[in-house]
Amino acid sequence: MTGRILAVNFGAQLLPFIRGTSAQNSSGQKIAFTGAFDDQEEITMEVKQVKLIYFSATGTTRKVLESIAKGITAENVVHINLTLAEGARQTIPPFSDELVILGAPVYGGRLPVDAINRFKQLKASKTLAVLIVVYGNREFEDALLELKNLAIELGFIPVAGGAFIGEHSFASKDIPIANGRPDSLDLQKAMDFGPKIKDKVTALLSPDAQMDLDIPGFFPYKANGARSMAVSPITKEDTCTVCGTCAGVCPTAAISIDGSVATKIELCIRCCACIKNCPTDARVMEDSMWKDIANWLNENCSTRKEPQIFGISDSEN
Ligand SMILES: Cc1cc2nc3c(=O)[nH]c(=O)nc-3n(C[C@H](O)[C@H](O)[C@H](O)COP(=O)(O)O)c2cc1C
Ligand code: SF4
Ligand code: SF4
């Protein structure tokens, strides 16, 4: 058997991991393996750390990733938050022996362009990755497949994936769309996913292990991504205290504060972080087309969807 030896370590557990792209199992069957390990190579790898890497303007993706990490019960969990421009400028050390959980919201059935651009600075080298998208109870369409393809391009080996539900960015108290999600049930499901991920990584030790990760979606992608609309939230001067919170949470630095709040419409990606974080509800969406979309979502996407996970066998799902 040609192959390589990996040791997968979650905390105290250290397991030898023998894999090969052309390996055969004890019955003589070829192991299906789509990862990028080299033949003839023997190395040791320990998953010492879980790294959460995410773009999450309104924080729902971040919450899901945190719950998954809780379920994994890794000794060391590190956050790499690429939501803000400053975060995206941080130097990210090369990956080594960690398990990465990569998460992004769904915008127009695809990944947000800013998430893609930020993730593109990651350089992995056969690093195991779990891929998560969070969507607002409409559909996730091609987004998780896009994340899988991007992760492979960046050098990750996807082991499992998940599509979770988060409160829709366009939702409000008056126009609810999956309000309050991820809720306690979603977060419990995210936590329950943690041990399954551990099991999946451990199962990779088996000579019968299948590394293919089937993700729904179309390539070439059918979904078009978020529509470009020359609109942004506006500020109600009478209730704005010029506290600057909105500028601090804007992922594209579209907001500046100089005695009052100014927004560069052309930079706005309509993530709604400024609206959801304004302490006086002074940031609002007034645009009629935007409101129409929110009303449509409220009317047509109110039936609760449940999180789905991929790459874990049905009996465990
Ligand atoms: C511009 C834009 C487009 C969106 N498109 C979709 C979509 O296609 N399907 C969906 O279900 N939710 C969609 N959403 C909702 C977000 O995916 C959802 O609110 C998610 O929880 C936001 O993640 P975050 O809190 O990590 O930013 C969209 C949100 C925005 C801002
Ligand atoms: S967060 Fe709200 S109150 Fe604070 S500056 Fe922005 S709009 Fe004004
Ligand atoms: S100005 Fe636009 S991009 Fe910036 S936080 Fe508000 S909605 Fe998001």
Image (cartoon, rainbow, N blue to C red):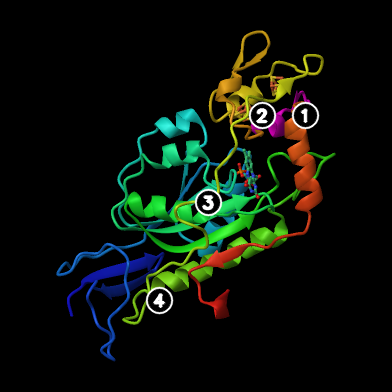
- Which quadrant of the view contains residue 91? top left
Question: What residue sits right under mark 2 in the picture?
Answer: 274
Count residues near mark 1 (Cα–Cα under 10 Å), then give few for <14, some for 14-19, many for 20+.
Answer: few
Q: Which tag, 1 or 4, sits closer to the chain's start? A: 4
Q: Which residues are magenta?
A: 273-284
Residue flagged by tag 4: what amino acid is it?
Answer: Ala
**Number of the front mark, 2 or 3:** 3
The answer to whether the beta carbon of the residue marked 2 is less than 8 Å from any atom of ligand 3 is: yes
For the N terminus, the quadrant is bottom left
Q: CA distance from mark 1 to mark 4?
A: 52 Å
The quadrant where ligand 2 appears is: top right
The answer to whether the beta carbon of the residue marked 3 is less than 8 Å from any atom of ligand 1 is: no
Q: Could you say which is closer to the camera, residue 166 or residue 217?
A: 217
Outermost residue, right direction? 174
- Which quadrant of the view contains residue 49? bottom left
- Mark 3, secondary structure of its residue: loop
- Which quadrant of the view contains residue 80? top left
